[in-house]
Amino acid sequence: MALSDPGKYRDKSADFMAMWHSKRGAEVRELVTEELIEEHATNPECELGHQSGELVQVLNYLRMAPTPGKDFGYMTSPFQEYRIGLISVRGAEVTFPADERIFTSEHEVVQEIFLRRLVRMGLRDEESAS
């Protein structure tokens, strides 16, 4: 049947993506262990060599999340002070929570963002993240 009014056609890609994230998220959640979190803490940016295949899979899954709602590291004082910002929608200003921690190294802020994204994407329970 031909589309007579494309404006009334419901985009079914959201259905597929929800199904895919549900299935892939369950697979990736199995990879998240304390050892994997420790590996990320010691080598978040691959300075010490390649990361394990499991960590690469988890990071790739986290990177696939839509941009709105993502945390990012922001350097407030060159190489001395970092904060975490939150991206909302395209064109809107970034927000910085008033009670947000100040980090003293890029390593610390990258690790904290990693842990937050694990919780936000349902790959780690909030209780175990504390």
Image: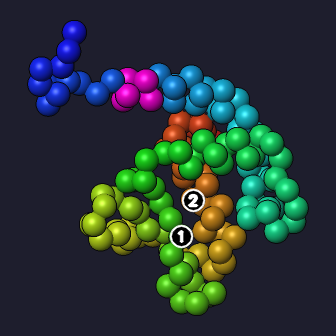
Q: Residues within 10 Å of mark 1 (few under 14, many from 20)?
A: some
Q: Give above or below for 31 relative to 90.
A: above
Question: Exactly how many numbered labels are in the figure?
Answer: 2
Q: Residue at x 85, y 56 (%)?
A: 50
Q: Which residues are magenta?
A: 13-17
* Residue 129 in view, yes or no: no
Question: Which residue is at 50% across, 85% downward?
Answer: 76
Task: Answer above or below: position of 50 versus 58.
Answer: below
Measured in 3D between alpha carbons, the distance from the residue under mark 1 to the one under mark 2, in whole angstroms, is: 8 Å
For mark 2, what is the residue?
A: 113
In this view, the residue in front, 127 or 42, is: 42
With respect to residue 89, does 6 lie above or below? above
Quadrant assignment for the N terminus: top left
How packed is label 2: few (under 14 Cα within 10 Å), some, or many (20 or more)? some
Q: Secondary structure at mark 1?
A: strand
Q: Which residue is mark 1?
A: 73
Furthest-bottom residue in this view: 78
Seen from the viewer's position, the closer of residues 94 and 80 is: 94
Which residue is found at the position 82% from the left and 68% from the top?
47
Mark 1 and mark 2 in contact? Answer it, CB < 8 Å. Answer: yes
